[in-house]
Image (spheres, rainbow, N blue to C red):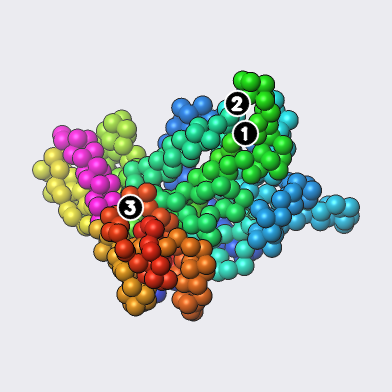
Amino acid sequence: GLGLTNKKAENFGEWYSEVVVNSEMIEYYDISGCYILRPWAMSIWESMQAFFDPEIKKLKIKNCYFPLFVSPGVLEKEKEHVEGFAPEVAWVTKSGKTDLDVPIAIRPTSETVMYPYFSKWIRGHRDLPLKLNQWCNVVRWEFSNPTPFIRSREFLWQEGHTAFATKEEADKEVLDILELYRRIYEEYLAIPVIKGKKSELEKFAGGLYTTSVEAFIPNTGRGIQGATSHCLGQNFSKMFDIEFEDENREKAKVWQNSWAYSTRTIGVMVMVHGDDKGLVLPPKVASIQVIVIPVPYKDADTQGILDACSATVNTLVEAGIRAESDLRDNYSPGWKYSHWEMKGVPLRIEIGPKDLANQQVRAVRRDNGAKIDIKSVDSVEEIKKLLGNIQQNLLEVAKQKRDECIQVIHTWDEFVQALGQKKMILAPWCDEEEVEVDVKARTKGETGAAKTLCSPFEQPELPEGTKCFASGKPAKKWSYWGRSY
Ligand SMILES: O=C1CCCN[C@@H]1CCCn1cnc2ccccc2c1=O
């Protein structure tokens, strides 16, 4: 029947798989690591896109589309950039029964697809800045445990690729885009994130520096990279000869960025807000914000109740609220309550004989279960307010839970203890790579090693003489550490 067999606090992995399927977002596919995105998931992707695409167009970024296929020559152009990733690259080796003389790679990301053409298109400084984005799928044939939305062999994302004459312009754009990612998480998905810089070990090896928004999953005590905005420096322009004649007719290499968020965002939302009744959708990304359900009663005026439901939906829709009714006569009200709770619809409206008689409706919030009687005449205004409160409450509750998981430490013993308590750890660090490698080695265990998540832009006070928690050397910065996805 209805309802989840797994509890979020008891077996998180099974709970998550059940929620994404029972909420009708995901259907498992017969190829491991590949998932069907059903409309209930696709509409969430589309609502984020409906925010992000106009925003990047305001920044004069233009959408394009490059081929899915990459010729081996360019993919292997730079050993450093690709070597660590090579095992994940999927290759086309045949067409029909015939072997291709040269295998063709499927894009895992598009730097090497795009940049030979950036080199062709950029001649003079008047060709700059070049700012392109594409909405597409990418393929990475990963072998670690596949998880819908979080880690799949094919996923949807947007990838921005930009080229500037100066480093200053590139540095500014990195942060402009990172702010858009923060807004996606905090204003749409109601998920708190931390903006910061990745360590040298964790950054994109092909770039100059990596910034990211980091989320945290309290149930597993793992950090998760929410989205990433890299400054590539001139690494790729040197590799691909992307140069221009500057004002004093000198040849100069361009400064580049690349940035992405993916369908992983949806998985983070499920993990953070979901509960034992199923999915919980923030109103901003809910394709149905209000579901209206008739509660007929024996010989009471059933037609009157059905008409009131339809009238309520029409009034709400006219006011721009995404409302629908569930008038199916082959399901009980109780069944419908569970069904739409499982799908995470933020607000339910019940209309029974009493409500009809009193010219009111009963609203039930999905986030905290509160029941509110609303005068039908005030329904639009009251429901808009309720949806706003739900959006804000989801963020506040998530922020409070996340903050409870943050632990500031100063010593190795405190670090190990906090790690065991599934915390997101804020620690003073000497910023030396071999110390980071050492921490990974010393915390290797069945639940995975601890790594740096990011060094937050907002740095707490670092008193003179503070020691690195892991090496005892003078600490240079505060960094977040933890196990991660
Ligand atoms: O993050 C982004 C943002 C969007 C554009 N690409 C960058 C960097 C991607 C890093 N990466 C990630 N997995 C890979 C897998 C196979 C080959 C290459 C790669 C690879 O370069």
Occupied quadrant, residue 33:
bottom right
Q: Nearer the viewer, residue 304 or 65?
A: 65
Three-letter amino acid code at the position of disc 3? Gln
Name the spot of residue 87 as percent of width and height, x first: 69, 63
Residue 461 against residue 113 in the figure, above or below: below
Asked if labels 1 and 2 touch by Cβ distance under 8 angstroms, the answer is: yes
Report if the beta carbon of the residue with label 2 is closer than 8 angstroms to ligand 1.
Answer: no
Name the spot of residue 157 as percent of width and height, x first: 55, 46
Three-letter amino acid code at the position of disc 1? Val
Disc 1 to disc 3, how far (Cα)? 31 Å
Q: Name the N-terminal-most of marks 2 and 3.
A: 2
Q: Is residue 80 visible?
A: yes
Q: Name the N-terminal-most of marks 1 and 3.
A: 1
Q: Residue at x 46, y 76 (%)?
A: 443
Q: Nearer the viewer, mark 2 or mark 3?
A: 3
Give the residue at mark 3.
Answer: 459
Q: Nearer the viewer, residue 176 or 14?
A: 176
Residue range highlighted in magenta: 377-398
Please check the rendered image and state whether residue 216 is part of the magenta-colored stretch, yes or no: no
Name the spot of residue 56 as percent of width and height, x first: 48, 32
Q: Secondary structure at mark 3?
A: loop
Q: Residue at x 33, y 52 (%)?
A: 459
Residue 460 against residue 437 in the figure, above or below: above
Q: Which mark is residue 128?
A: 2
Q: Residue at x 31, y 30 (%)?
A: 318
Disc 2 to disc 1, how far (Cα)? 9 Å
Name the spot of residue 365 as percent of width and height, x first: 23, 52
Q: Dot 3, crowdedness within 10 Å: few (<14), some or many (≥20)?
A: few
Is 111 left or right of 180, judged from the image as shown? right
Give the residue at mark 1.
Answer: 254
Q: Main secondary structure of the magenta part?
A: helix
Q: Dot 1, crowdedness within 10 Å: few (<14), some or many (≥20)?
A: many
